[in-house]
Image: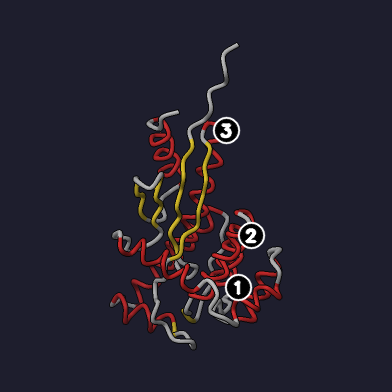
Amino acid sequence: MSAAIEPPVLRIDFVSDVSCPWCAVGLKSLEQAIARLGDAVKVDVHLQPFELNPQMGAAGQDITEHLVQKYGSTPAQLEQNREAIRQRGAALGFTFNLRNRVYNTFDAHRLLHWAALEGAELERSLKHALLRAYFTDGDDVSAHAVLIRIAGETGLDPARASEILSSAEFADDVRKRESFYTGNGIQSVPAVIINERHLISGGQPVEVFEQALRRIAAGVER
C-alpha cells in the first residue's frame, strides 16, 4: 500500500493591529477561507504585531479628529467608510459599533506575544477578544484593567497579565517584530504573508483568500 500523501503546509503570518477595522475583517475572512480548505491544506498561523499609531498618547484621541488629521477625510467620507466596514463585518459575523476614541495598542501586543507563548489557541482567542472589545464594545484597549479582564476571560492567568503589564516584559520582543515587518516594507495592515514569500494586502473577501491559498499550496513541494 502506498503511503498517504501529506497535505501541503502553509505558514501564514498575519500582521495587524487591534485598532485596525480592516484587520478585524481580514482575520475573519482569512479564517473562513482556511475553513473552506478543509484537510486539503495544513496551515500554521502566526499573529504578528503592527501599530497604526505608535506615538499615540495614553489618553488616546477622538477618533473623528484623528482620522481627519491623519487622512484628511471629510465627514461624508468617514461615514461612507464606516458603513462599508459595518457591512463587511456583518457579512462575516463581526459587529462594528460606533467608537469614540483611538488608543495606543502597544500593551495589547505585549499580551498577545505572551499568549502566543502559552499556545496558539489562546493567542487567537485573545486577539478576537481584543478586536471585539474595541470595535464592538468600545472599550479602551490600552487600559490595564481592561486588558487584564480580557486576558482572564480568554483563559489566560490575569495575575500573570497584570505582572506583565506592570513591567516592560516582552516590550523588546514586540518592537523587534514590528521593526522586522516595517523594515521589510509593510506600511499598512492587514498584511498576510504566506510561507514568508507571498504577500496578500488588505481585508480581502473570503474567496480571494481561498483562491490565493489554494494556488500557493498547489506550488508547494511535498
Question: Which residue is found at the position 41% from the left and 29% from the top?
Answer: 221
* Front in this rendered view, residue 211 or 163: 163
Above or below: residue 34 compared with residue 122: above
Q: Of the residues shown, which amino acid type is indicated by label 2? A: Glu
Q: Would you name the residue on which mark 3 appears?
A: 39
Apparent side of residue 65 relative to residue 34 in the rendered image (left or right): left
Q: Earlier in the sequence, mark 3 or mark 1?
A: 3
In the displayed structure image, the side of residue 97 where residue 160 appears, left or right: right
- The three-letter amino acid code for the residue at tag 3 is Asp
What amino acid is at disc 1? Asp
Q: Quadrant of residue 178?
A: bottom left
- Residue 117, image x, y percentages: 59, 60
Q: Nearer the viewer, mark 1 or mark 2?
A: 2
Image vertical order of residue 101 relative to residue 43, above or below: below
- Residue for badge 1: 137
- Tell me where residue 53 appears, x and y as whole percent: 39, 76
Residue holding disc 2: 118
User: Is disc 1 in contact with disc 2, using a CB cutoff of under 8 Å?
Assistant: no
Front residue of this view, candidates 24 and 179: 179
